[in-house]
Image (cartoon, rainbow, N blue to C red):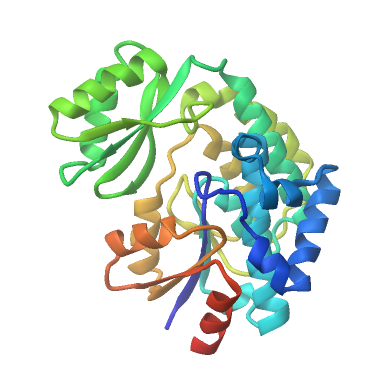
Amino acid sequence: MTLAFIFPGQGSQAVGIGAELADAFATAREVFQEVDDALGQNLARLMREGPEDQLTLTENAQPALMAVSAAVARVLERDFGIGPDRAAFVAGHSLGEYSALAAAGALTLTDAARLLKLRGQAMQRAVPVGEGAMASLIGPKTDVALAEAAAAEGARLGVCVVANDNNQGNVVISGAKAAVDRAIEAAKELGARAIPLNVSAPFHCPLMQPAADEMAAALAEATILAPRAPVVANVTARPTNDPEVIRRLLVEQVTGRVRWRESVLWLAGEGGVTRFAEAGAGKVLSGMIKRIAPEAEATPLNTPADLEAFAQSL
């Protein structure tokens, strides 16, 4: 068995995330306290009690999801003896790349929390509310080629690109609202279903360049170490353990495409990964794995029981 740890992105947040872990493990409570101290806010209470509209704010959702992933990773290491070096690779979806780097020791928990707080704020500042949009193109005919064709139609009216290549049947586009609206119509004409997403900003598109500039300045000051397992980066779908490459790719990721389908194909192919463990909230990535690499095993690690069963299976 060759193992990869994978870490979810935005959208997996819900009131109550991390509560079971905190109730069961002092290690998890320690992680949540470290994140609270880093941010100077009671994020742990917001995660446990809500309100949901505050938790869903990008600047809160991003560090909250990282905190849950970090708690899973640290509990596995401290309470079950399963460190990130047991994995051949780590990877994360969008903000999950920061979770992967924190779990693998490339970023401190404090730096990851602060960088993600800033990332969320910078993304929100980059485009005024209502001027950007995202849409999910779904259905059996939906692939990246169809999404690129639809985005090209939208781009006649403004910025419109493929933002997330999640899996066959699920591709997300992002850009200026009028352009995305046009791309939605084009996608329907091409045989896809198109669902506008309830997001506060158009992530992973060139409109995010002001946010990329802010992140470049912040990341230039951050200490990044070689991860204990290579990280498969979103924008290249290939592994690296070079701190300076990681720093550059985290900046590129703000405006660049999340190449998740390609990342999983590389991991399950050249990487030889036969088992994926999704560390954090929800099981969205595990569902994607089953569609991209059905021969591989995908295990969501959400609850104390999940962690115990996983540890016993190794």
Instruction: Note whether 197 is above or below 20 in the view shown.
Output: above
Left or right: where does residue 270 sit relative to residue 299?
left
The N terminus - image quarter = bottom left
* Residue 104 showing in the rendered view: no
Q: Residue at x 17, y 47 (%)?
A: 140
Q: Residue at x 55, y 35 (%)?
A: 254
Q: Residue at x 71, y 50 (%)?
A: 112
Q: Position of residue 141 (x, y in %)?
A: 15, 42
Q: Position of residue 153 (x, y in %)?
A: 24, 19
Q: Nearer the viewer, residue 238 or 165?
A: 165
Q: Position of residue 134 (x, y in %)?
A: 41, 28
Residue 182: quarter of image: top left
Q: Position of residue 122 (x, y in %)?
A: 66, 28
Q: Residue at x 24, y 26 (%)?
A: 150
Left or right: where does residue 265 sit relative to residue 122?
left
Q: Nearer the viewer, residue 268 or 43?
A: 43
Q: Nearer the viewer, residue 199 or 161?
A: 199
Residue 214: quarter of image: top right
Q: How many marks?
A: 0
* Residue 287 showing in the rendered view: yes
Instruction: Note whether 240 is above or below 123 in the view shown.
Output: below
